[in-house]
Amino acid sequence: MISAEPLPLSIAGQWRLGAGDAYDSLYPATGEPIARLRAASLDDVDEAITRAHQAFRDSGWAQRLPHERAAVLYRVAQLIREQAEPLAQKQRLDNGKPISETRALVASAAGTFQFFAAALETLQDTLTPARGPYVTMSVHEPMGVVAAITPWNSPIASEAQKLAPALAAGNAVVLKPAEITPLMALELARICEQAGVPPGLVSVLAGKGAVIGDAITRHPLVKRVSFTGGTATGRHIARIAADKMMPVSLELGGKSPTMVLEDADLDHAVNGVLFGIFSSSGESCIAGSRLFVARPIYGEFLSRLSEGANALRVGDPASERTQMGPLISASHRQNVERYVALGVSEGARIRTGGARPRGPEFDRGYFYTPTILEGLDNRARTSQEEIFGPVLVALPFDDERDLIEQANDSVYALAAGVWSRDFKRAWRIGRAVQAGTVWINTYKQFSISTPFGGWRDSGLGREKGREGIFQYMEQKSLYWGTNEQPLPWAT
Ligand code: NDP
């Protein structure tokens, strides 16, 4: 247990208990409580947003020069790095990812603050070509209070990905982490405070999305929502946003195709496919969960893949050697199990996995073995719906046209992977597949400098990249008259 006492939230510039219900955050590897919290109440939501609005108006944060705000964000990056190990351990306890992965998430969060500090310092507005006796400029202004709503799968990284550009843009931020993984958002708020972000500018409101997230989205002082989570929730938020005429960005689900051509480097492809689906226990929006393999190599490839999946080290997230930890919760594991059963009822053969691992070290946690299903059609529900767990659906394909048609036959279009030594084919397929991100001869690589987002049901808008800051700003055109004479109006 991190603390027997309930943890305070960061509400309206104060550290205090939420006025909502008490609940525990559980360690997914053992089911034991690791922290006790009191959720925010609807009054807390209103108070935090009202105070954030005041802080935006009065603290001078938005008026600081870009390099001055950047200096604070650089300090945030530095403080995250100084506390990297305790943060990584806490993140492991909060969501059960292996320690090697939570260390990478913490490093990514520090890198995100550093990147947006640098982007802010070097961001340029535009002088547009004048078409009259005036100078024309396109500039950007902060929006006010913006909200960030995040899921449980990579908390510190996805929270930094929203908090850093929103603060860089000069806004106040209300952050709503997933109810079951609130600890990193609270750490980020504490670090922002230590780094010199003005009081009240950042609040963290833990609690149920359907209550707290909904109230935040509807609040009239919230001028933008940046959301990462499931497609159904994204649609709900978009409907509220439509009524408020409020911009939103939605990073949603996926069922990403990975395509292995007959000329692929099979060692690389086997490793890449395993990493693409089974790292993070498959609880990843970009998991390569639909595998298409050229028919002539299908048999050999599946044999090697199954061997690799069976050899993955599933177990204690605290061990440096562990590759796959538990799933996030008992109920999520049940969802994954239901999908495997559905797959079987749709005609799937379980090539490997398809069960809970056995042994005392697995008894209390929410573990599930890496699973490969074969024999399904691409139109089967199991091939089409996001499982968000360590379950791969493998299908053969016959030719390039057949491949592209099947790969694009999905409501999702978040990411895709191509494995081929033929650079012209890889290029053709990389351009023809519909997805926000395509990896060629690699998979699940992430760079904060490269825009990220989905097409279709996988989302709206892009995060990351220098332009990521503009998503949290309004654009304004300025005309500055240089006329020597009055406007030719009433002469
Ligand atoms: P959810 O959509 O259930 O939850 C995401 C966040 O939204 C949580 O903080 C949740 O709170 C909150 N929320 C729930 N209901 C509402 C509501 N009515 N109004 C406002 N906020 C609400 O997704 P999961 O947590 O189950 O996360 C998994 C999903 O996230 C997957 O579909 C995955 O693909 C997607 N995802 C997408 C990524 C991307 O970048 N494209 C990255 C990571 C995940 P609470 O915790 O209380 O439910």
Image (tube, grey):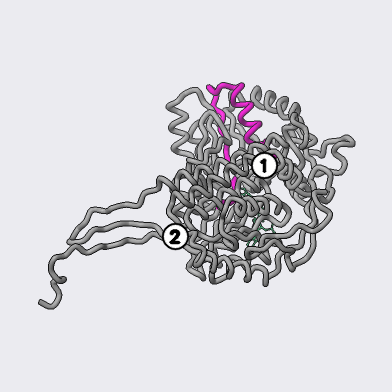
In terms of depth relative to the viewer, which is nearer, 482 or 384? 482
On the question of residue 345 being in view, the answer is no
Q: Name the secondary structure under disc 2.
A: loop
> Which tag, 1 or 2, sits closer to the chain's start?
2
Residue shown at 44% from the left, 37% from the top: 431
Tell me if 326 is positioned left or right of 107 in this view.
right
Q: Is residue 298 above or below residue 357?
A: above
How many numbered discs, if any?
Answer: 2
Q: Is residue 255 magenta?
A: yes
Residue shown at 73% from the left, 54% from the top: 180
Q: Residue 122: image x %, image y %?
A: 40, 45
Q: Residue 427: image x %, image y %?
A: 44, 31
Residue matched to label 1: 83
Q: Residue 335: image x %, image y %?
A: 75, 50
Span colored in magenta: 251-280
In terms of depth relative to the viewer, which is nearer, 93 or 408? 93
Q: Is residue 59 magenta?
A: no
Q: Quadrant of ligand 1?
A: bottom right
Tell me if 464 is positioned left or right of 475 in this view.
right
In three-dimensional space, the C-alpha distance between marks 1 and 2, rounded to whole angstroms, equals 30 Å
Identify residue type, mark 1.
Gln
On the question of residue 150 being in view, the answer is yes
Residue 296 picture quarter? top right
Q: Classify 10 Å Cα crowding around label 1: few (below 14), some (14-19), many (20 and above).
A: few
Q: Name the secondary structure under disc 1.
A: loop
Where residue 63 is drawn, which disc sits there?
A: 2
